[in-house]
């Protein structure tokens, strides 16, 4: 089991935009294997989880808004 204070995890430098793009492509399901490997080495897993959770909330809210818009017509 890895140590939570492992410097290799804490030293990962990935921008917020690159994390959002990686999570967005994961939602779509289209990603090159080489890009996936680079993301695994570069992005902080905690940031990926946070952005993924936020993306799920936005997606569900958009679906609820769409259903309410269609039903209200």
Image (cartoon, rainbow, N blue to C red):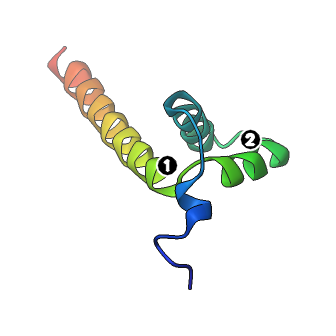
Decide: is 10 above or below 17. below
Residue drawn at (51%, 78%) of the image: 3
Image quarter hosting the N terminus: bottom right
Q: Is residue 15 above or below residue 36?
A: above
Residue at image position (70%, 53%) is 41
Cβ–Cβ below 8 Å for labels 2 and 1?
A: no
Farthest bottom residue? 1
Instruction: Give the Cα distance between marks 2 and 1.
Output: 15 Å
56 vs 23, nearest the viewer: 23
**Quarter of the picture holding the C terminus:** top left
Position in image of residue 71 (x %, y %): 20, 24
Q: For the residue labelled by badge 2, is the local secondary structure a helix, a strand or a loop?
A: loop
Q: Earlier in the sequence, mark 2 or mark 1?
A: 2
Position of residue 16 in the picture relative to residue 50 (left or right): right
Tell me where residue 72 sits by quadrant: top left
Q: What is the tally of numbered marks visible in this picture?
A: 2
Callout 1: SS:
helix
Residue 28's label in the rendered image is none
Q: Position of residue 5 (x, y in %)?
A: 47, 70
The one nearer the camera, 61 or 43, is: 43
Q: Residue at x 61, y 44 (%)?
A: 26
Q: Which residue is mark 2?
A: 31
Q: Position of residue 38 (x, y in %)?
A: 75, 47
Q: Residue at x 74, y 48 (%)?
A: 36
Q: Single out the mark in the foreground, 2 or 1.
A: 1
Q: Is 32 or 41 nearer to us in this picture?
A: 41
Residue 7, how many percent across, how many down? 57, 64
Disc assigned to residue 48:
1
Q: Residues within 10 Å of mark 2 (few under 14, many from 20)?
A: few
Q: Is residue 47 left or right of residue 62?
A: right
């Amino acid at each position: 089991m890895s140590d939570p204070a492992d410097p290799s995890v804490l030293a990962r430098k990935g921008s917020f935009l690159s994390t959002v793009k990686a999570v967005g492509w994961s939602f779509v399901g289209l990603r090159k294997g080489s890009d996936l490997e680079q993301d695994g080495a570069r992005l902080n897993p905690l940031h990926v989880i946070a952005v993924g959770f936020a993306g799920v909330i936005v997606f569900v809210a958009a679906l609820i808004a769409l259903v309410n818009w269609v039903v209200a017509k």
